[in-house]
Image (tube, rainbow, N blue to C red):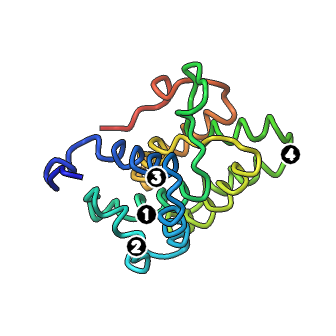
Amino acid sequence: MTETATTMAQPGNGERFINYLKELADDEDRAALAALRRSLGKTPGEAAEAHRHVLRFNPDPWDEWAYYLVAGLFALHPESWAHKEVDRQSTNFGASFAWLKSKTDSDSIEKRLVALLDCHEDDLAEHLRHAVSLLRSKEIPVDWAQLLRDLRSWNHEDRFVQRRWARAFWGGNQTDQQADEAPS
């Protein structure tokens, strides 16, 4: 990449990061995806193999954990909403879980989502790893760019991310624009 660190730190960096991950999957770069999968369950400092794929996007130090987590989860299941026909519906993680519930009709899906919505940031990686594995087993896509944005706001005092996921799961197919916007 020829972009400078200054350019890469501008808004839209998350989208470029997700596009990079999609290129790795499209190019079937198994070594890179394996390195990212191995980073799951580790703190960013312990994931040395993943550094070259994450740090080139110069994430804010406060958001680094979200970039590493999304990279590892993406490598586990690179199926994205962007590759599916979407009719202006919500594509956040709650919508993926709603799709999963419609395919399985299992009561445990709702329980898993509730546990995810209630979990503390420290436990989020483990919950998401199990959730993404479940989505992968049913070939349900994930909106990776939205997940990255959501993780970066996970601890907001208004819990707007958790409400949007809940709305997408229990409230039907609404667009994220109709859902609660991030408070300013």
Q: What residue is disc 1 on?
A: 68
Mark closer to the chain start, 1 or 3: 3
Q: Residues within 10 Å of mark 2 (few under 14, many from 20)?
A: some
- Expressed as whole percent of the image width and height from the top left, the position of residue 51 reads 35, 70
- Residue density around tag 3, few if under 14, some if 14–19, many if 20 or more, within 10 Å: some
- Mark 3 and mark 2: Cα distance apart in space: 20 Å
Q: What's under tag 3, amino acid-wise?
A: Leu
Pick the front one: 80 or 111 = 80
Q: 141 or 89, which lies in front?
A: 141
Q: Residues within 10 Å of mark 4 (few under 14, many from 20)?
A: few
CB contact under 8 Å: marks 2 and 1: yes
Identify whether 89 is placed above or below 165: above
Mark 4 or mark 3, whichever is nearer to me:
3
Which mark's residue is nearer the viewer, 4 or 1?
1
- Mark 1 or mark 2, which is nearer the start of the sequence? 2
Q: Which residue is mark 2?
A: 44
Q: The residue under label 2 is which amino acid type? A: Pro
Q: Amino acid at mark 4?
A: Ser
